[in-house]
Amino acid sequence: SMENVDKWYAIEYLINKLNIDKEEVITIGDNVNDEKMIVNAGMGVAMEQSTPKIRDIAKYVTKNNNEDGVGEAVKKFML
């Protein structure tokens, strides 16, 4: 059925397949369709240009797209 088709569902599938903990997962999003993955990941990151709700639920807010926000988050949390 289509009700389980969302980004977090796909990530959860991989977490189970790869036998890793959701606390080890970083997600980066900017829109309401990213809410579930931002809330559920160990490190949910919102882009600066996100809606206020998404910025509020994120554990970290990175720079915007034009300022290489994804790269900034990768450097901060993964390198």
Image: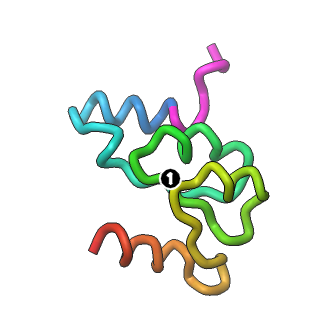
Q: Report the residue at 21% width, 33% height from top.
A: 19
Q: Residue at 56% x, 72% y: name it.
A: 62
Dot 1, crowdedness within 10 Å: few (<14), some or many (≥20)? many
Farthest right residue in view: 51
Placement of 67 over or under 1, stated as above or below: below
Residues shaded magenta: 1-8
Q: Residue at x 58, y 67 (%)?
A: 61
Image location of residue 27, percent across then percent down: 48, 53
Q: Main secondary structure of the magenta part?
A: helix
Which quarter of the figure has residue 16?
A: top left
List the residue tagged with mark 1: 44
Q: Residue furthest bottom?
A: 67
Q: Nearer the viewer, residue 44 or 1?
A: 44
Q: Is residue 57 above or below residue 9?
A: below
Q: Is residue 6 left or right of residue 40?
A: right
**In x, y percent, where is residue 50?**
73, 62
Q: Amino acid under label 1?
A: Gly
Q: Is residue 13 left or right of residue 28?
A: left
Q: Which image quarter holds the N terminus?
A: top right
Q: Residue at x 47, y 34 (%)?
A: 10
User: Of helix, strand and loop, which one carries label 1?
Assistant: strand
